[in-house]
Image: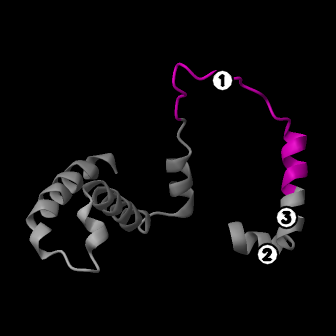
Amino acid sequence: MSFKLGPIILGTLIQHFLRKDRATKDSKAREEILYDEAFTIVKAFMEVATRHTVEELQAFSNTRIPAPPWVRTVRVMVPLSSCDEAADHLISALGGKEMAHKTVG
């Protein structure tokens, strides 16, 4: 995805200034360059995401993001028994196993 962002951002930047004179009442929000860039990036990500499985997208979004140096972090271990108990509570809150599977996957 990161290889595709460079041309997308550059293309959006150029298009943003080329179509500035064609702004209509409905496209006023796209006049802001940051909004235009963010909208284009999200749209491109959604188009790429439709070609991948849920598992691949979950693996992509499961990357660790390091904390800034000024933030204190404390690593903790959550016991698996607590995770299992939380899963049971979530399943019951969602209306059973079948409904949880339909909702979450």
Residue 44 among magenta residues: no
Q: Residue furthest bottom?
A: 25
> Residue at coordinates 64% horizontally, 21% vertically from top-left?
72
The circle drawn on residue 91 is: 3
Residue wearing tag 2? 99
- Magenta region: which residues? 65-87
Q: Where residue 30 sits in the image (x, y, percent)? A: 27, 67
User: What is the CA distance from the residue labelled 3 to the residue labelled 2?
Assistant: 8 Å
Q: Where residue 56 sits in the image (x, y, percent)? A: 51, 55
Location of residue 99 with respect to 36 vertically, above or below: below
Location of residue 74 with respect to 20 vertically, above or below: above
Indicate the amino acid at tag 2.
Met
Q: Is residue 46 left or right of residue 95?
A: left
Residue 105 in view: no
Assess disc 1: are there few (<14), some (14-19) or many (≥20) residues with their C-alpha within 10 Å of its C-alpha.
few
Task: Name the main secondary structure of what is drawn in magenta.
Answer: loop
Q: Is residue 60 left or right of residue 42?
A: right
* Quadrant position of the C terminus in the picture: bottom right
Q: Nearer the viewer, residue 41 or 2?
A: 41
Circles 1 and 2: CB atoms closer than 8 Å: no
Q: Disc 3 vs disc 1: which is toward the camera?
A: 1
